[in-house]
Image (tube, coloured by chain):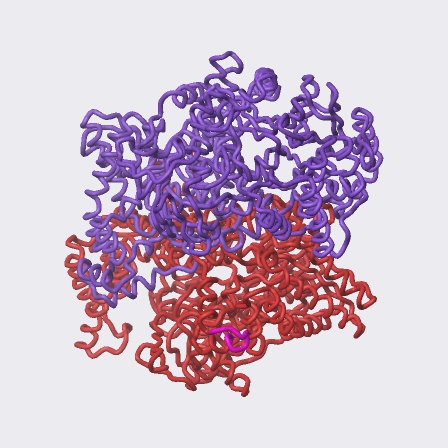
Chain colours: A red, B purple
Amino acid sequence: MTQWIYGFGNGTADGRGHMKNLLGGKGAGLAEMSHLGLPVPPGFTITTEACTWFYQNNQRFPQELAAQLKTALTKIEQQLGATLGDAHNPLLVSVRSGARASMPGMMDTVLNLGLNSETVEGLAKRSANPRFAYDSYRRFIHMFAGVVLGVPHAPFEEALDDMKRHAGYRSDTDMTAENWKEIIGEYLQIVKKETGKDFPQNVDDQLWAAVGAVFKSWMNPRAVTYRNLHDLPHDWGTAVTVQAMVFGNMGNDCCTGVAFTRNPSTGENAFYGEYLVNAQGEDVVAGLRTPNPITLKAKAEMKATEPAMEEVMPAVFQQLCAVRQQLEKHYKDMQDIEFTVQQGKLYLLQTRSGKRTAPAALRIAVEMVEEGLISQNEAVLRIEPKSLDQLLHPTLDPKAKRTVLTKGLPASPGAASGQVVFTADRAEELAHKGVAVILCRTETSPEDIHGMHAAKGILTSRGGMTSHAAVVARGMGRCCVVGAGDMVMDEYAGTMNIKGTTLKEGDIITLDGSTGEVMMGDVPRVQPALTGHFATLMGWADRLRTLRVRANAETPRDAETARRFGAEGIGLCRTEHMFFDAERISAMREMIVAKDQPSRVAALEKLAPFQTKDFAELFAIMDGLPVTIRLLDPPLHEFLPKSENEMAEVARLAGVTVAYVRQRVHELHESNPMLGHRGCRLGISFPEIYEMQVQAIARGALQAVAHGHTVLPEIMLPLIATEQEMNLLKQMVDKVMTAEMMAAGKTIDYWVGTMIELPRAALRAADLAKHAQFFSFGTNDLTQTTLGISRDDAGMFLADYQRANIFPHDPFASLDTEGVGELIRMAAERGRSKRHDLKLGICGEHGGDPASVAFCHAVGLHYVSCSPYRVPIARLAAAQAALKADPAEIKKAAA
Amino acid sequence: MTQWIYGFGNGTADGRGHMKNLLGGKGAGLAEMSHLGLPVPPGFTITTEACTWFYQNNQRFPQELAAQLKTALTKIEQQLGATLGDAHNPLLVSVRSGARASMPGMMDTVLNLGLNSETVEGLAKRSANPRFAYDSYRRFIHMFAGVVLGVPHAPFEEALDDMKRHAGYRSDTDMTAENWKEIIGEYLQIVKKETGKDFPQNVDDQLWAAVGAVFKSWMNPRAVTYRNLHDLPHDWGTAVTVQAMVFGNMGNDCCTGVAFTRNPSTGENAFYGEYLVNAQGEDVVAGLRTPNPITLKAKAEMKATEPAMEEVMPAVFQQLCAVRQQLEKHYKDMQDIEFTVQQGKLYLLQTRSGKRTAPAALRIAVEMVEEGLISQNEAVLRIEPKSLDQLLHPTLDPKAKRTVLTKGLPASPGAASGQVVFTADRAEELAHKGVAVILCRTETSPEDIHGMHAAKGILTSRGGMTSHAAVVARGMGRCCVVGAGDMVMDEYAGTMNIKGTTLKEGDIITLDGSTGEVMMGDVPRVQPALTGHFATLMGWADRLRTLRVRANAETPRDAETARRFGAEGIGLCRTEHMFFDAERISAMREMIVAKDQPSRVAALEKLAPFQTKDFAELFAIMDGLPVTIRLLDPPLHEFLPKSENEMAEVARLAGVTVAYVRQRVHELHESNPMLGHRGCRLGISFPEIYEMQVQAIARGALQAVAHGHTVLPEIMLPLIATEQEMNLLKQMVDKVMTAEMMAAGKTIDYWVGTMIELPRAALRAADLAKHAQFFSFGTNDLTQTTLGISRDDAGMFLADYQRANIFPHDPFASLDTEGVGELIRMAAERGRSKRHDLKLGICGEHGGDPASVAFCHAVGLHYVSCSPYRVPIARLAAAQAALKADPAEIKKAAA
């Protein structure tokens, strides 16, 4: 028989702290604290498995549950000598959610369950505190009605407000027992009116309804959204913990509070918490009353006037300090605890690993190593790699005042202030003059890249986390907020409107790329320091990892940033990005509209010097590190002029008519450009383009060598699907390189390889490895083709898909290891079978995603390449992957 | 040491008839005929391997070749007592190409090699026929200059025309020995002028240059085009046969001819051929003189006036008849032979399997079975499945009025109507626009092939049944009438005149390829009768095959055609095709622009009755056969209004503003619709659409059952990539089906399955098979995603790709078995591992492609589904696949 329920309390428990998957964080914490002998009110936890069963069986409970619950409840009743529903000595319980991972405030809770019109009188008498009893009952009615019966809050709040107004009260504490009694009458009326039924008086009905409601709250929209945002699976389910109530609201010798064993904001090793006298926990969370610091130190720092717990209840405070020490020593991590003091007696209601900022996490991890609490390896495993993002970008000064206009999706972190501009050209123009600008668009397209580059930040009203704007901005390390739906562009007026505020060019706004907030005016920022605890921890990580980390970079600035962040080479230099520059795009367009090969060659000759110079600079910066250069990839029409003016300019340059240019633009249009005439297909159709690029690589490398640099060029062919393509183009590269090296009388050690970004390339990897010296998995395109989903169009249904749990996470953000991953594994195996020293890397967006980095480690790739700003994330993720792949370390971490 | 050369002649040979891959068709045929003791002039064949070596080694010859050639040549010289280059008794040789498969006229040939200004005198003296000797020499100079030296034909032709005009001659036969001698002088001048060098007098130089030229002609543009059109690999290479010349042009006791052992047009078991007295083979092929029939029977049928060979050379004719019998009995197939009679002595120059029309192929195969020459299995293997296409299309209505302009030779059967065009380029241009054209030429040459392919029919004024036009048209299955002597082309005016009627481009004519009639206007056509030899052979095929054949069909008409052609079910009913009808598209559009779910449901309710009726009809027609219905697949915007009028109409119907409709159209736009919001993604986002469709299937099926039909609906989900999609939608289908069946109180046996059209679906096939009862490989989409090529855009580079031999054939026409095929194989295996009775089929375009059908058989699919007109092709291809998969049959067929 399945054990659906695990009891705890009285110095023992059925479960343990490591059973989070089964008992949820709260249930596991309570069980563990019981074992530690800490004062925990007795209770029991219904497992997450029961929740999963509930959802798999049309929202029914497992048959055995009723009997197990009865037994568990009886145990509590026996310990406390009180009985649920007993008119004289009623047991009251709380019913709380608790998932594997903390989802603060996302699911529902019911407190004071067990009260009805009869038991409330028993409680009043027994506590000799009718006000407390009636207060508890009205709280229960309100909470139960909201959570279980779906009654809105407004009527309850209005009723209470009315009464306080009539009575001239300013605060709930002014309410008398009689007032609460009267309110109870009104609340019961409200429930009857809103639901058509009486408020349930049967306490068993109350309990079962509350358990069901907590299970159901697992799938409420805000919980689903929270899991989507935090990459948590929807099939985990929540546990439900039913626990005897203790009361922080029985008088002034009572209080309730939360505390962190260290400062969660800075990581400082100091006890840190807040409490409220004569209150229930909900009062703290709901912000109805402002809580006070628990320590005198904090009171002084915050210049608070209200007394600290340390003064008011010194004995209990000392007890709490002892608990703090015990829990940290036991858990070897900073804990977030909830406690209640009932009539001078301390009770612990929760302990869990405390959420913390990235700087705090680093400090705590490093200091715990110094204190001998944990090992370096454990410290490395402690830090969530993605959280480093917060440290690498300039951030808003947390002390600054914010006037938030609206909130979009936090697409690329960092903070940026600047003047509003509406076009890429204008962004570039003003940026050249040294003006900080924020590029605001409905959505961006590849033509906007120069403007995105010029801007400090990008704001769009459409698009998701993987929209063009988001991906490009992350690649550039530009702060970016996308999908700010409240923002309406008026292109005719040259303005945008956000919830009634009209902004025009030149108005200053600030973006917070980590929260998605759009703020009025220039909010002050602070630069990150890559030193101290960060440097210490990254040093430990680098010693552990076997995966190399490279960066995707084209410009000297990106390359320099990449080195600063510890990149060990460039894994993807997208040569096409070098063509969007104003002075180059014309020659590029001239090349594309060329009528024949000679005119194409003439236009290419104008581009060649730019490319040569670009490559020479990149090689110089990356001195001694490999630089992987991808030959031209996107469809030619992406570069084409759209406006009549631009067409006229191209016609003039190319010596053709505007009509011809227009026709050429039309001819180059594609139904599905992603699957069109791009990548190596361009190199096959127009060999002169690739020849020019290879020549420029050769010359750039030779120049760098002449300046004393060590160059390691890796020439990469995109969108290869067949051996013949690889063979033909490899021959071309070798021919051009040989000619250039012979002309210069110098030899360069260069490699030729291919992207693996089509399923066919993965399947035929053994053939390709005959000619390719390296593979780089282009997982953006590989995801698109394997799943048949265009990244640009996915927004239309990806939300529906995540809601329906079809994708556990956005496959463009984190690798689909089952599908795309199998192709990667297959390609790695097949490629190596033909060439044992084949170098393998990944250069898609996934290269900076920790879960994907772990997969890359497992498959045995040699490196990942990601945007410069994600390099430290990848370094840490790679270290964790190496640790987790080591069974000894896994055991240690789980202990 | 590699043997590069195989000799033959004098009743023996180094090679045999089955060595076509090594010796080419011609070389193998000559070797085999030598073994059979037939009179073959001695010679030798340089292997295709030598050609491959030549191309792999920068167009050089293998080192050992020179010595081997010398030895082989000496053998011929010894047999004939003549020596190459000998001034008194010179040996003359022909140098001919010969690939594995016949490529008529595509590669080059040099005749009369060994002549120079010295040996021609020896030949004149020894033959006592100076006219013959000089004629041969001028032929040699012209041909060698064209083929080897690249000199254009025009100057030679002009020189000859000038001389004839001056002398008042009408025909080449009027030319005297002196005339030819004079022409030789002029020809040598032309060569000197065009090449800057003297015509090579060294006979060894002549020979090596000719061999190299033939090798090079393997890659000439028309040969490459021909191979692309016929799906022949470019890496086969050609063999070169060097053979002692025999002369059909030594006088009136000489002739040259070609013959088929049966009628290649009808298949009748009658000797059939043409000959020319006092001529060389090139005269017949080039259509310079119109040849005469060899038999009296044919002479009578064609109402020819010139004598038949049977009358002129009765003894040699009888000898030829004996050869006919011997060859047919030996090869067990209809042979196409070339012969020359020199001074009353018969020589055979070639034998090969004769090209024939599809009806002829069927008749010959069936009659040879009846004659006991071959088995039924061999007969089935004899028919090229694609050739059946010719039989399945309409022929002229015998009752229709015909305005016959003239009559030519019925060179390739079928009927075709279309606009008159006079050049191959124009034919191609108009055909691309969807215009049916008839290509009209004086005669065709290999440069016209692309136009012949583009045209519905071909009409020439010159040439016989074995002329270029006739041979090529039969190969392509194009209707063709040749030698319509009444037709006079006026190339300057761009018109042609037939007995006083002047036709210009765009005028419409009709050809009857079975009678040779050329008619004015568009003559109505009737459906073919699928009886006689066709029915007999298809009966044999059906007994052999294990693969079932279904059709892709939506309309009742298509379904009826499919059944008539032997389809065993519908493998793909594309429900979206049912929405494009005028009366339905409005409701469809209303549904798409719907603001919310209720308005969408309202619009769907208008569509539901149409769908129900459609399905009921389909089920009735396919009574007792399975019908696979795919739920809505394409992106919604495909249905959207484009014009303002249409938008207004939709706005009116849907009760929304035009601006709203315009906005919705804009919103639904996708960058890559192929990878967008389509297929089952629509079913996830808008469940009501799929629910309506399933309801209509259920109701249609129930109606058909009520009318006494047996229904086997198979509901197919498109674009599935994950198990969760499959699971969710399968549940939806079951729910709706159950509800409908319960309402009707009847049960229907239905299946639910999925397309496998994304690489991920193939990889995760085991997961999908948990829920899917069948898989249908959607190889169009699977090819697009596996190769990353949009079919709509592939035109931009697919030509470059076929030229560069990157794809051996268009992957959308014939399955990429290495890439896409591996995914199919993998999906079949993985799917079966989870569900052993999983039904597997294919419903992409490839279902009607014989090579792809063979692959499907090999992988163990249960059925292929293709367009109704390709069903018989697939049936035959399936039978051949079954036979070829049986080792015993392979051996028999190869024997």
On the question of residue A813 being in view, the answer is yes
Q: Position of residue B308 (x, y in %)?
A: 52, 24
When the figure is inspected, residue B669 is found, relative to residue A759, above or below; the finding is below
- Name the one closer to the observer, B384 or B731: B384
Q: Position of residue A443 (x, y in %)?
A: 42, 70
When the figure is inspected, residue B145 is found, relative to residue A337, above or below; the finding is above
Residue B248: quadrant of the picture: top right
Residue A187: quadrant of the picture: bottom left
Question: In screen coordinates, is A703 left or right of B304?
Answer: right
When the figure is inspected, residue A710 is found, relative to residue A20, above or below; the finding is below
Q: Position of residue A563 (x, y in %)?
A: 68, 70
Q: Main secondary structure of the magenta part?
A: helix
- What span is in magenta? A650-657
Q: Position of residue B500 (x, y in %)?
A: 35, 46
Asked whether residue B821 is drawn in magenta, I would say: no
Asked whether residue A656 is drawn in magenta, I would say: yes
Q: Quadrant of the N terminus of chain A?
A: top left
